[in-house]
Amino acid sequence: MKKAPFYIILVTILAFSCNSKPTDKQGNSDETTQPDSTALVEKALIEEKDQILHKYYELKDALVASDLKLAQGKAEELSTALKEHGNSGEVLLMSQAIAGAQELKDQRVAFEKLSREIYAMAKNQYSAIR
């Protein structure tokens, strides 16, 4: 009879220790160290849009420098990035127009339209994520 409380305590300790969540070296459970799938998707979408915006800014810098050939190359890179991420429509058409333009003036006209489309795309995509 005197051993009964000892066994009850032992069984209780074992039950709680087997039922606890695994922890890392800092004592964090798996739930806090493992990001959920929604967060991973949001991060991927943000990285995708950041890549497109980065290409857009490189194109803008080439136009500011008045470098026709560099702007054509950067517009081609932007077009490729847009295609890789499944973007089409007006944004893709404007970037292709800049890549194919033979005059800096024509590139800048197309860039104005591209800027409006990029702004709308970024605004819609980022607001949908958040």
Image (cartoon, helix red, strand yellow):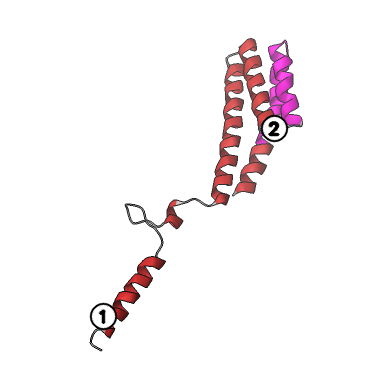
45 w.r.t. 111: above or below: below
Residue 91 horizontal/vertical position (percent): 72, 30
Residue drawn at point x = 71 percent, y = 11 percent = 103
Residue type highlighted by circle 1: Phe
Residue 116 appears left or right of 11: right
Residue 5 horizontal/vertical position (percent): 27, 84
99 w.r.t. 33: above or below: above
Q: CA distance from mark 2 to mark 1?
A: 74 Å
On the image, numbered disc 2 is attached to which residue? 116
**In terms of sequence position, does the residue under pointer 2 or pointer 1 come before the other?**
1
Residue drawn at point x = 66 percent, y = 19 percent = 76
Residue bounds of the magenta highlight: 90-119
Residue type highlighted by circle 2: Arg
How many badges with numbers are in the image?
A: 2
On the image, numbered disc 1 is attached to which residue? 6
Q: Examine the image and state in which quarter residue 112 appears.
A: top right
Return the mark for residue 47: none
Label 2 SS:
helix
